[in-house]
Amino acid sequence: MSHFFSDLAPLTFDPNADGIAFRHYNPDEIVLGKRMEDHLRFAVAYWHSFAWPGGDPFGGQTFERPWFGETMKDARLKADIAFEMFDILNAPFFCFHDADIRPEGASFAESERNFREITDIFASKMENHKTRLLWGTANLFSNRRFMSGAASNPDPEIFAWSAATVKLCMDATHALGGENYVLWGGREGYETLLNTDLAQETEHMGRFLNKVVEYKHKIGFKGAILIEPKPQEPTKHQYDYDVATVYGFLKRYGLENEVQVNIEQGHAILAGHSFEHEIALANTLGIFGSIDMNRNDYQSGWDTDQFPNNVPEVALAYYEILKGGGFTKGGTNFDAKLRRQSLDPNDLIAAHAGAMDVCARGFKAAAAMLEDGLLEAERGKRYAGWKTPEAAKMLSMDLESVAKLVDVDGPGPQPRSGRQEILENIVNRYV
Ligand code: XLS
Ligand code: NI
Ligand code: NI
């Protein structure tokens, strides 16, 4: 034991507890025929919890952690404390990038050795801890070599370095039984068209993704390959802007049945969408995979990665997820970080416990809304006209034939209320 979280026992469901506990998240509670833990599939993000020093654009490190440092000893201690936290949180999953878990070496080979030593430690820890791997990923954006992108970098050596890094991270994800592999194109985009060949860069990204999918099949990785859309930040224009853009990209490269999306709440907001819009669209297009449940500050317009705390918003997101049949391989990853003044070890635990409770409340509300069926009944009524055979037939008729169906002498169709306020009032009964 490291004693970093010295006085904290594993959290349990206890609505009347004095201190930190789950007040709404009861892993064993059956909702819609399944344990809540199996529905929500919470994951802790290694990077924000253990590798982020608390900096912002105006100031550096605020956190003091005994594992901060660039040695393998630090990396091993970090892994010990990470699994201690997973145990305290009773976390079913975690997620990591290569760069979160190991110090960068002086060469690719040294970085790889460092990485493998820690993933071997993960493998042995996972034999006697419950926490599984939701997804692995490669950090192809922090190191300065990636400043102009990874797969889309004008320098072919960086393309190769990125391929080697993704291969290594896919191998580790596969070996650890990961359920997904994520690609977030952190710097796959551009700052100015003046120095950018957009056609070549997007072509390279398409080729790269094809290689990733081929490799997945070659090694027999059964997890899902996920792209995480984001419109901007760090680059001015990011190629994986939103779900719709990613779908167009996948279609262009014939990958729409191979790759799905990991949708982040904050990224949806940055793209000018709601979270539930992105989820609903991904379900419609058949590419929904997983979520990063971290919210943005609505004023700052920045990816502030805050833990979720808005039950009505979370409820609408889970409503769409449940309507799509719920998670299969995906889950709820907290790609969320503390505020930089939250220095104490307990803040890390409280942040996750609170987020799990917020999600549980939203999820239970979503399940009840779906079970009661009021919203779906209203939606059904709105589209009822299409239930008639004559209406359905129109979809396969040509334009002239459809035009002939209009009663040209009558008063024309009469508009009907969209009843938005009534629907919002219904939602409010649950949240
Ligand atoms: C950054 C992204 C990142 C991905 C994983 O905005 O959310 O954290 O989830 O690379
Ligand atoms: Ni993000
Ligand atoms: Ni994310």
Image (cartoon, rainbow, N blue to C red):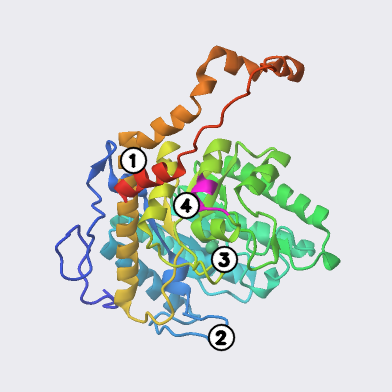
Instruction: Please tell me in which quarter of the rendered image ligand 1 is found.
Output: bottom right
Q: Which mark is residue 255?
A: none
Residues packed near mark 2 inside 10 Å, few (<14), some (14 to 19) or many (20 plus): few
* Residue 139 versus residue 217 in the image, above or below: below
Q: Give the Cα separation between the discs numbered 2 and 4.
A: 30 Å
Q: Which amino acid, mark 4?
A: Ile
Circle 2 residue: 58
Q: Residues within 10 Å of mark 3 (few under 14, many from 20)?
A: many
Residue type (three-letter) at the residue carrying disc 2 = Phe
Rendered position, 348 above or below 207: below
Mark 4 vs mark 1, foreground winner is 1
Can residue 253 be seen by looking at this rendering?
A: no
Give the image location of residue 192, x and y in percent. Answer: 79, 67
Q: Residue at x 41, y 65 (%)?
A: 307
> Could you tell me how far apart the alpha carbons at marks 4 and 3 are, in whole angstroms?
28 Å
Say what amino acid the circle numbered 1 marks. Answer: Met
Q: Which residue is mark 3?
A: 112
Circle 4 residue: 291
* Quadrant in the rendering for residue 46: bottom left
Vertical comparison of 28 with 384: above or below: below
Contact between marks 3 and 2 (CB within 8 A): the answer is: no
Q: Quick one: SS at disc 4?
A: strand
Q: Earlier in the sequence, mark 2 or mark 1?
A: 2
Return the disc, 3 or 2, that comes first in the chain's sequence.
Answer: 2
Which callout, 4 or 3, points at the residue further toward the start of the chain? 3
Residue contact between numbered discs 2 and 1, judged by CB atoms under 8 Å = no
> Looking at the image, do the residues carrying marks 4 and 1 touch, with CB atoms under 8 Å apart?
no
- Give the CA distance from mark 3 to mark 2: 33 Å
